[in-house]
Image (tube, grey):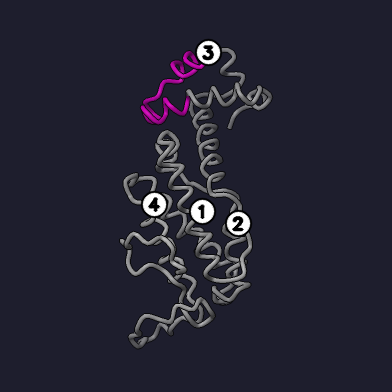
Amino acid sequence: MPLPRFDRLPADTRAAILAVARAHFARDGKDAASFNQIIAEAGISKTSAYHYFDGKDDLFGAVLADAAVRTLTALGPWTEVATADELWEQLVAGTTRMAAHLREHPDDRAVLAGQPLSDDGSWVRDLVSNGLAIGLIAPAPGAELVTVATMGVIGALDSWALDHPHASDHALADTLVLFLARLWAANPAPTANPAPTANPAPTGKPGAAAKPGAAINPGPAANPGS
């Protein structure tokens, strides 16, 4: 991460340096990008550059963190809801905003591809806590494990989406809903010789699955709660 002197620069100066570096890393990749070319285009001397960063890896870390913040800002904070329909709607809306940001900012997408896109986990914890409170998520095996598993599902889909820029926003959102509905289903069937079941009632209450799309490649409807 950048050295303290970089953090003391004016915000617009920091943003300008990171924008130049982001463009180089997005175009050339981390390994091929030239640290000397980046700092020259940013208008800072090599001496000054080493007051701000330990080297190219350090600069890339700063660009990566900035791209993650920009993308997660598009997601927005989790707002507590009272019903399963409202939870799914907020999840779809947030996922769609993130996908739109990455489509409109291809340099962020290129930098983040292959890298973990995560905050401190508070967004997912709030999501799971809300789902437990309204009975959408089964209380067993426990909030901590469900949170970790939910982070894994979201992280896997984030990584896939970053590597597939042409996937539609609606398909990504519906697929996330489908995966999480399967993960969270309250009172799941026993694992030993489970009997085949028809599609469960889409009530969002304990003992029933939520309202996901019908397939991994869902149709154009993006509102799973309808």
Camera-side mark, 2 or 3: 2
Calculate the distance from the C-alpha at mark 1 to the C-alpha at mark 4.
11 Å
> Picture quarter containing residue 81?
bottom right
Q: Which residues are magenta?
A: 21-45
Q: First in sequence, mark 4 or 3: give its number.
A: 3
Identify residue for label 3. Answer: 43
Secondary element type, mark 2: loop
Report if the CB atoms under discs 1 and 2 are less than 8 Å apart. Answer: yes
Total numbered badges shown on the rendered structure: 4
Camera-side mark, 1 or 3: 1
Q: Which residue does the image show at 35% across and 88% down from the upper left?
A: 195
Checking the image for residue 222, the label placed there is none
Checking the image for residue 169, the label placed there is 4
Which amino acid, mark 3?
Answer: Gly
The spot of residue 113 in percent (x, y) is 40, 41
The reply, left or right, for residue 3 in relation to residue 189 is: right
Report if the CB atoms under discs 2 and 3 are less than 8 Å apart. Answer: no
- Circle 3 residues within 10 Å: few <14, some 14–19, many ≥20: few
Quarter placement of the C terminus: bottom left
Checking the image for residue 94, the label placed there is 1
Instruction: Report the front residue among 146 and 208.
Output: 208
Camera-side mark, 4 or 3: 4
Secondary element type, mark 1: helix
- Circle 2 residues within 10 Å: few <14, some 14–19, many ≥20: some
Calculate the distance from the C-alpha at mark 4 to the C-alpha at mark 3.
38 Å
- Circle 4 residues within 10 Å: few <14, some 14–19, many ≥20: many
Which amino acid, mark 1?
Answer: Gly
Check the image and report above or below for 107 versus 190. Answer: above
Report if the CB atoms under discs 4 and 2 are less than 8 Å apart. Answer: no
Which amino acid, mark 4?
Answer: Asp
